[in-house]
Amino acid sequence: MDFSLPAPRVIRALDQIIEWRGKPAAIRCDNGPEYISQTLVAWANEHRITLIYIQPGKPTQNVYIERFNRTVRHEWLDLHSFVSLDHAQALATQWLWQYNNERPNTAIGGVPPRQLMMAA
């Protein structure tokens, strides 16, 4: 099985996030093949970003993403049947925009994440 393919997609997404939000000191991630590839390790070393891996079988060590994944499942995946990859991507983009710009988040005072970010 070739695990090298997902890494470039992850790296492109991380580069884009760094462009938008700035460079983090560390990234916490699980042990999925897209996160343990030599390509990602080399990228992190080049950018002087520490990769912190959670212990196998301990999803609570990455509680924020686990909570987000639960929200994605209940508010997006469970509600749609996709007819194509393009259809799924369009619905995902629409849902993510609403999640960040319109949906109140109780963990941050009942405001959408974008509103909190703009206030900072």
Image (cartoon, helix red, strand yellow):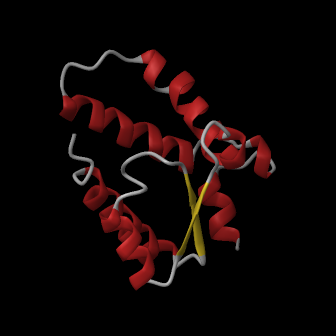
Q: Quadrant of residue 105?
A: top right
At 21% from the left and 46% from the top, the residue drawn is 2
Looking at the figure, which quarter contains the C terminus?
bottom right
Q: Nearer the viewer, residue 116 or 55?
A: 55
At 19% from the left and 34% from the top, the residue drawn is 86
Q: Is residue 75 left or right of residue 82?
A: right
Residue 14 sits above or below residue 69 on the image? below
Q: Is residue 115 left or right of residue 84?
A: right
Give the percent coordinates (x, y) of residue 65: 60, 45
Q: Is residue 30 left or right of residue 79?
A: right
Looking at the figure, which quarter contains the N terminus?
top left
Give the percent coordinates (x, y) of residue 90: 28, 37
At 68% from the left and 42% from the top, the residue drawn is 104
At 36% from the left and 43% from the top, the residue drawn is 93
Residue 75 sits above or below residue 58 on the image? above
Q: Quadrant of residue 79?
A: top left
Give the percent coordinates (x, y) of residue 101: 55, 50
The residue most toward the right is 109
